[in-house]
């Protein structure tokens, strides 16, 4: 039976301390990555021929609603990625567990590399 290097504190998984000099992925990084993707997608759509058929107010409203939907779905997928990593990957491979911000960065990077 393989044991992971996750510490448990009152039934909550706690990541072990990081090595000195290691940088963390923060919420600010994830917001910047999401903003980059949103601006890129919005500009791409505005440059297309389809954007001319819609009024600007409709484009802004639907873009805002789409952004909210995208954030909710990404947060849910990031939670699944983190749980999958914590429960399976760390028990199979001697690798450190990831936190939610790192899982969200993985989801955002896959969306950037494979999306659109």
Image (cartoon, rainbow, N blue to C red):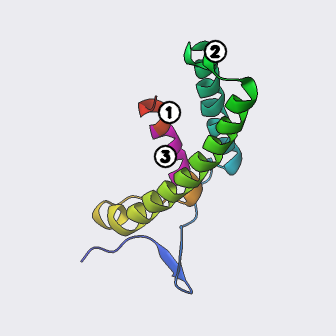
Judged left or right of residue 11, residue 90 is left
N-terminal-most mark, 3 or 1: 3
In front of the other: 69 or 30: 69
Q: Residue furthest left?
A: 1
Task: Give the label, 2 or 3, closer to the camera.
Answer: 2
In space, the residues marked 2 and 3 are separated at their CA atoms by 31 Å
Q: Residue at x 58, y 64 (%)?
A: 17
Label 3: how many Cα within 10 Å (few below 14, some 14–19, many 20+): some
Magenta segment range?
102-110
Q: Which mark is residue 107?
A: 3
In front of the other: 72 or 100: 72
Is residue 39 magenta-colored?
Answer: no
N-terminal-most mark, 2 or 3: 2
Judged from the image, the secondary structure of the residue bearing numbered disc 2 is: helix
Q: Main secondary structure of the magenta part?
A: helix
Label 1: how many Cα within 10 Å (few below 14, some 14–19, many 20+): some
Dividing the picture into quadrants, the one containing residue 57 is: top right
Judged left or right of residue 25, residue 116 is left
Reading the image, the residue beneath label 2 is: 52
Q: Which mark is residue 112?
A: 1
Examine the rendering and report whether any part of residue 77 can be seen. Answer: yes
Task: Give the label, 1 or 2, closer to the camera.
Answer: 2
Q: Residue at x 58, y 54 (%)?
A: 72
Location of residue 10 in the rendering, given as x and y in whole percent from the top left corner:
57, 87
N-terminal-most mark, 1 or 2: 2
Q: Residue at x 51, y 53 (%)?
A: 103
Location of residue 38 in the rendering, given as x and y in whole percent from the top left corner:
63, 33
In space, the residues marked 1 and 2 are separated at their CA atoms by 26 Å
């Amino acid at each position: 039976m393989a044991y992971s290097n996750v510490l448990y504190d009152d039934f909550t998984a706690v990541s072990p301390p990081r090595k000195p000099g290691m940088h963390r992925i923060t919420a600010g990084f994830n917001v910047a990555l999401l903003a980059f993707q949103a601006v890129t997608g919005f500009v791409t759509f505005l440059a297309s021929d389809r954007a001319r058929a819609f009024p600007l107010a409709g484009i802004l409203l639907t873009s805002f609603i789409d952004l909210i939907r995208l954030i909710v779905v990404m947060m849910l997928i990031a939670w699944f990625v983190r749980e999958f990593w914590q429960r399976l990957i760390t028990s199979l491979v001697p690798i450190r567990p990831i936190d939610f911000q790192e899982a969200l960065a993985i989801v955002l990077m896959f969306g950037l590399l494979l999306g659109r």
